[in-house]
Image: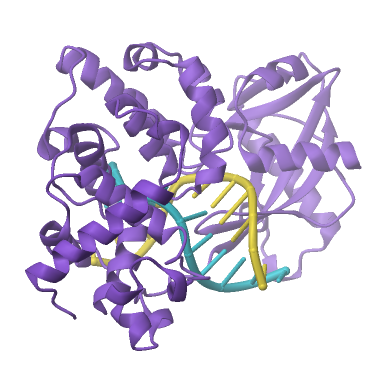
Chain colours: A purple, B yellow, C cyan
Amino acid sequence: MVEWSDEQIQAFRQTLLNWYDAHGRHLPWREDHDPYHVWVSEIMLQQTQVNTVIPYYERFMTRFPTVGDLAKASEADLMKAWEGLGYYSRARNLQKAAGQIVNDHGGKWPRTVEGLRELAGIGPYTAGAIASIAFNLPVPAVDGNAFRVFSRLLEIDLDIAKPQTRQVFEKVISRIISPDRPGDFNQAIMDLGASYMSAKHPDSAHSPVKAFNQAYLDGVEMQFPVKSKKPRPVKVAYYGLVIQHADSFLMVKRPGNGLLANFWTFPLIAEDDVLARSDTPDMVTDEERLTLLEQLFQDEFGLQLHVVPIGGKPVKHTFTHRQWLISLLSAQLDSNVDLSFFPGKWLTTNDLAKIALPKVQVKLFKRLSKG
DNA sequence: CAAACGTGGCC
DNA sequence: TGGCCAAGTTT
């Protein structure tokens, strides 16, 4: 790891901030330093690209202009505003924190990193970002950009996927950060990481800080940052049941925790749960699978179904850690069947247009309309 | 600490 | 196509 002298640090700050003043990005949440604006944008930007966030941010500020508006929003409105952004616990934590600010802090923001960390959904990165950008506190905001930029500048070869690596970067950046303009410094690092020092296509030859970029100078830029690989998504096969009556679909509400918590989807039955009902799961025919599925529905929910396969390949949807392969089946059911043992209800197309749906369910509807 | 947690873009 | 990346936090 490279160590910079005090003179080098001064020169780096000046070079970086001069570049940022001339070429920093103009983004909707950079129009002022309102902590509410900084906060909402930072949460949306977690694991999400700038271009994706911009329209969501604009709509969100129109819909919920202040932290008070957010605190009193309905869950349905909130999720509709977040629909498609993913990592939905971010939205729930956002509203929970809005309630903390309004109720526990009398509408005033905590102005320390420690105070910010008490708020739901605010971890070490976001606390540093809000503290430095909104309150001008000289603290680092170590996100993926900061990890990548400083690992290359200083040839830090620690695995950035390990939690304990963060404190090393925080300590290093704390010494380098501009004490006068910490918010601009942190944002400049992000802009640098999104341009001249991007992950896949860096252009260090033209970078404003190329003279400080030891990994580039040594011709080993692409060896940084060091990051251990994550396991591949596990494949899971489901049967997705399209149960219609008039203009309604029989939908289920997912559990309040876990993947896609509280979202409505078609009934999804794991293929494994179907095969588990056979004595010889290794030699079950397609025909027999459907019969087993109908028996499962009868036993679990008291519903008499007759399912028919819908043509085409299974609908594939990949999450960070799971890949769903959904084979669609259709079934008819009377609207007056007893649903007292079934964890769902009929939703009209009008209902469905109003609620937030996860992308995988949108895919399933698209498959239906395409045939 | 390792794993869970969504989605879109890129090659 | 599959794998990786994109302004992380929670448990």
Between A207 and A89, the residue placed more toward the observer is: A207
Between A64 and A330, the residue placed more toward the observer is: A64
Q: Can residue A161 be seen in this view?
A: no
Q: How many marks?
A: 0
Where's the N terminus of chain A, which quadrant? Answer: bottom left
Q: Is residue A226 visible?
A: yes
Seen in the image, is A302 located left or right of residue A313? left
**Identity of the residue drawn at 27% across and 50% down:** A186
Quadrant of the image occupied by residue A31: top left
**Identity of the residue drawn at 82% across and 26% down:** A244
Between A213 and A14, the residue placed more toward the observer is: A14
Expressed as whole percent of the image width and height from the top left, the position of residue A55 reads: 57, 32
**Identity of the residue drawn at 11% across and 38% down:** A114
- The vertical placement of C3 against A48, above or below, is below
Where's the C terminus of chain A, which quadrant? Answer: top right
**Identity of the residue drawn at 24% across and 43% down:** A183
Expressed as whole percent of the image width and height from the top left, the position of residue A179 reads: 12, 48
Seen in the image, is A200 located left or right of residue A338? left
Expressed as whole percent of the image width and height from the top left, the position of residue A98 reads: 30, 21
Expressed as whole percent of the image width and height from the top left, the position of residue A77 reads: 52, 17
- The vertical placement of A58 against A325, above or below, is above
Between A214 and A69, the residue placed more toward the observer is: A214
Q: Farthest residue toward the left?
A: A6
- The vertical placement of A200 against A48, above or below, is below
